[in-house]
Image: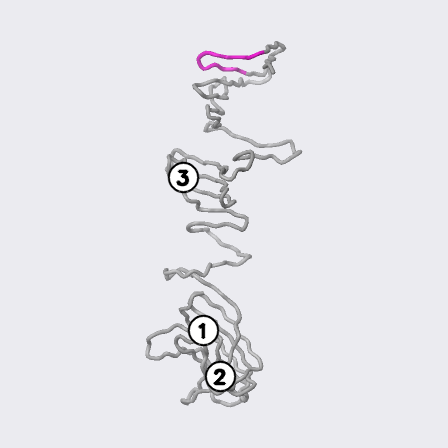
Amino acid sequence: MASELNVGGIKATGNISVTGSDPELKLADTGGSTTFGIRGNTDQLDIRNANSGAVFTTIDSTGAITASASGTYKLFNDGAADATLQLGPDTPAATRSGRIAFTNSSVSKNWFISSNWGTEALRIAPSTAGGGTTMDAPIATFTSTGLAVTGAVTATTLSTFSNGINLGNTASATATTLDGYEEGTFTVTTASDATGALAGESGEYTRIGNCVYIQIAINVSTNFTTNEVGGLPFAAAHYTAASSWRTLGIVPTQSTANVPIIAVIGDGNAHINFFETGTTAVHAPNTTNDIYRVSGFYYTNDAF
């Protein structure tokens, strides 16, 4: 199809060529004050203000479009449909991504927002290599399941976490790092006692770091031979101190006897032992005391 130029009622058909040193096609409206120019400029095309010479947009021989420092791009529609700016191949390809580069000549690091075809993610990454053209490892990655951040996340105020905080429960060698939290229930057992039986039991725990808070209740239906119950969610930490016992606290029961009972945990054990204070006697859970309640905390070296 032949090219056609129609300016002011003058029509020209065929190929239209404007040649010379920095050739320019100027467009002006009689009702406006600005003349716009489309100018060839050494292997690139400039769209500019022909009055002042200020360049708005440049298209080079590779098809790259560059805005001037004061240029503004707007994407809009007539309200009939959503406006779309597409970055990347027109037909999705397995090894192609779209990205936006933010460059600044006054600093040594540029930034990219890039799609990642390999993980179906949107990444934010700095660029320090290749003159600011090569992406470094991303500092933030958005996927369909959420946000992954590399490095520190800081904020002046953290007001609310409606979905809770997942610490990941990965051990840290840093003393000031809270590296684990867990809460749940456990089943209190007779710890293989030869005769003891429980008509009912409950066990709850909350672990923060290496500290385990527990609360249990047992209803003894058959007298025990030994002085222990088991089922703790984590074993007690093992120390080399003179005493290997760790006191949980006084144990309330249903008995009216005035002999206090204490609950302790031995080093490295996951069960509770009962003793009667003021005597050297162990205390075997029995139907006279009936219901025992234990609460307290201990330390553990067990992994989450």
Amino acid tagged 3:
Ser
Magenta-colored stretch includes residue 96: no
Residue 114: image x %, image y %?
48, 40
Q: Dot 2 corresponds to which residue?
A: 193
First in sequence, mark 3 or 2: give its number. 3
Residue 161: image x %, image y %?
53, 56
Vertical order, 284 against 12 (above or below): below
102 sits left or right of 244 in the view = right
The magenta region covers: 14-26
Residue 61: image x %, image y %?
46, 23
Which colour assignment does the render follow?
one colour
Q: Dot 1 corresponds to which residue?
A: 297
Question: Residue drawn 39% across and 76% down?
Answer: 267
Q: Check contact, mark 3 vs mark 2: CB within 8 A.
A: no
Front-most of residues 174 and 64: 64
Vertical order, 19 against 143 (above or below): above
Q: Picture quarter containing residue 241?
A: bottom left
Question: Residue drawn 49% across and 54% down?
Answer: 158
Q: Residues within 10 Å of mark 1 (few under 14, many from 20)?
A: some
Question: Residue drawn 62% across and 36% down?
Answer: 82
Q: Check contact, mark 1 vs mark 3: CB within 8 A.
A: no
